[in-house]
């Protein structure tokens, strides 16, 4: 509260005629911090959402270059639904993992998270980014990066599509109406681990076959673990093939 009083005093010294409404507006972000923070995402949840927004933006750009409308592209994003893959398309799925570690060490929540279903090809999208109080780019900026790509054929903003994304973000736990509060949180530095795709089948991860008799011990319900990704990343050509497959497009040259 002392900081609030100091900010109000400084504002009045600069402009003695300032209105109460403007005064409150100037310190609203501090009051929000002192109030209820249960409605905003934790630092780890923010990092996770940043990773998904980075991949969604990549997919939107790929779709735009191939005349796939944004409305069709966003249908492949399901990160807000914990029962589904983060991204999926015909016979392909992508799970997004974001870490602040100096190496690609990610938390895998269950045995099923990276397990292919049927003939599905699964890929891990890995990136490294760190939170820092001095970093200017905040979670709302990553949201804006996606919103800017939601445009109509004639080039104007697609407000209906922006509303749809906002609804999905709310299910995720992010409310755009609390942007000022997120802007008072630490920001994100530049990627220290560049976003890369990895094939699930090339990861030396925990599988059901890792256990005796291909079954979990009788008292174990599920397994979560930390995965140190050290397999080769996909080439640029292979990455494009994954993006095309997600969108239901034929491979390049076909």
Image: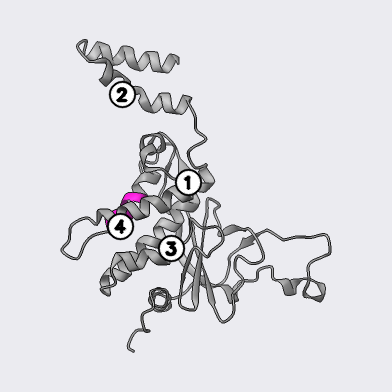
Name which of mark 2 and mark 4 comes first in the sequence: 2
Do tag 3 and tag 2 residues touch (Cβ < 8 Å)? no
Q: Is residue 217 left or right of residue 66?
A: right
Q: Mark 1: few, some, or many residues within 10 Å (few <14, many ≥20)?
A: some
Q: Where does label 2 land, which residue? A: 26
Name which of mark 4 and mark 1 comes first in the sequence: 4
Name which of mark 3 and mark 2 comes first in the sequence: 2
Give x and y (percent) for residue 226: 65, 58
Between 143 and 187, the one lying in front of the other is 143
Dividing the picture into quadrants, the one containing residue 11 is top left
| Residue drawn 41% across the image and 43% down it | 175
Name which of mark 1 and mark 3 comes first in the sequence: 3
Give x and y (percent) for residue 198: 52, 71
Do tag 3 and tag 4 residues touch (Cβ < 8 Å)? no
Q: Where does label 3 land, which residue? A: 77
Q: Mark 3: few, some, or many residues within 10 Å (few <14, many ≥20)?
A: many
Give x and y (percent) for residue 98: 51, 55
Q: Is residue 167 left or right of residue 101?
A: left
Between 113 and 163, the one lying in front of the other is 163
Q: Where does label 1 land, which residue? A: 173
Specify the farthest residue to the right. 218
In this view, the mark in front (2 or 4) = 4
Q: Is residue 21 left or right of residue 75?
A: left
| Residue drawn 53% across the image and 64% down it | 84
Q: Is residue 157 visible?
A: yes
Secondary structure, mark 2, is helix
* Picture quarter with the N terminus: top left
Name which of mark 1 and mark 2 comes first in the sequence: 2
Q: Where does label 4 land, which residue? A: 161
Secondary structure, mark 1, is loop
- What span is colored magenta in the figure? 143-149
């Amino acid at each position: 509260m002392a900081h609030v009083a100091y900010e109000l005093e400084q504002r009045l010294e600069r402009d003695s005629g300032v209105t109460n409404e403007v005064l409150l507006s100037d310190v609203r972000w501090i009051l929000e911090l002192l109030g209820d923070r249960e409605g905003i995402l934790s630092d780890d949840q923010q990092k996770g959402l940043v990773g998904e927004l980075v991949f969604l933006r990549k997919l939107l750009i790929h779709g735009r270059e191939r005349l796939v409308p944004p409305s069709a592209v966003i249908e492949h994003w399901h990160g807000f639904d914990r029962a589904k893959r983060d991204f999926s398309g015909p016979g392909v799925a992508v799970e997004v993992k974001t870490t602040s570690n100096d190496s690609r060490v990610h938390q895998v929540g269950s045995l099923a998270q990276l397990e292919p279903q049927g003939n599905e090809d699964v890929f891990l999208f890995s990136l490294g980014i760190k939170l820092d109080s001095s970093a200017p780019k905040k979670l709302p900026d990553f949201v804006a990066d996606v919103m800017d790509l939601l445009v109509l054929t004639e080039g104007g903003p697609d407000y209906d599509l922006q509303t749809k994304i906002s609804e999905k973000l709310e299910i995720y736990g992010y409310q755009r109406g609390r942007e000022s509060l997120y802007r008072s949180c630490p920001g994100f530095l530049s990627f220290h681990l560049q976003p890369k795709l990895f094939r699930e089948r090339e990861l030396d991860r925990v599988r059901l076959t890792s256990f005796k008799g291909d079954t979990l011990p009788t008292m174990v319900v599920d397994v979560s673990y930390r995965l140190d990704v050290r397999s080769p990343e996909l080439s640029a050509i292979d990455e494009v093939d994954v993006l095309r497959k997600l969108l239901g497009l034929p491979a390049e040259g076909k």
